[in-house]
Amino acid sequence: MDDQATNYRQTAWILMIGGFIGIAASIELIVQKIAVLSNPDFVANCDINPVLSCGSVINTAQAAIFGFPNPVLGVIGFTIVIMFGALLFAGVELPRSMWLGLNIGALAGMFLIIWLVGQSLYVIGALCPWCMVVWAITIPIFWQVTTDNLASNRLSLGKSLSEIIVTLKWILVGASYLIIMALIFVRWQDFWLK
């Protein structure tokens, strides 16, 4: 099996697994939102402590930045991700425009989670565990699609930079996680170190 076929299979797995996990987390967030709207005294299943508390996040303006609950975007976006994964598993040769469209969507997802991480840490003052699952899934999807596009020359940042990013893909995924975990730890270090 050549490198391109191996990379497509890896991309297909990441899209399929990530998409299903993302949809599950998004649906759970929608269920929790409906329960909170139906009963103001409802305690969300992800209210673990003062820091890890979906209930504190679900009712904020940040949880509906386009006027409807953010998880609706998750259900739509992750459905598209699963569709791409299924097409890759089926051996469909996708046109460059579709790959770039997927990359733009994944980049938009990254920008959204970066903004939501900042809002959760420094404005809302709480973390939503189900939201964090979505964050955790979006990161490898973004880096996999981006590096796949760079390796296939569908996207170029210059030969040297593209090769570096492709080579460091899993380090970039790990670094993304480490940055978020470090920010969370620093923000609530008094809580964690009690």
Image (cartoon, grey):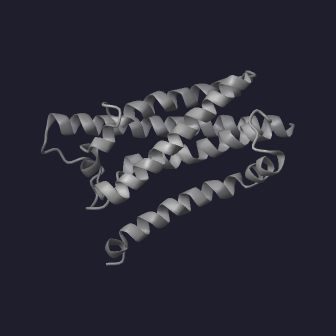
Picture coordinates of residue 20, whole percent (x, y):
51, 35
Of residues 27 and 187, the one nearer the viewer is: 187
* Image position of 73 with respect to 116: above or below: above
Please identify the residue farthest to the bottom as the structure is shown: 194
**Residue in the picture at 24% in, 33% down:** 34
* Image position of 101 with respect to 33: above or below: above
Picture coordinates of residue 131, whole percent (x, y):
40, 46
**Residue in the picture at 42% in, 70% down:** 186
Residue 85 visible to the viewer: no
Report the label total: 0
Of residues 71 and 28, the one nearer the viewer is: 71
* Image position of 84 with respect to 166: above or below: above
Of residues 150 and 193, the one nearer the viewer is: 150
**Residue in the picture at 41% in, 48% down:** 116
Picture coordinates of residue 133, whole percent (x, y):
45, 48
**Residue 75 as seen in the image, left or right of residue 124:** right
Please identify the residue farthest to the front as the structure is shown: 158
Of residues 148 and 92, the one nearer the viewer is: 148
**Residue 104 as seen in the image, left or right of residue 132:** right
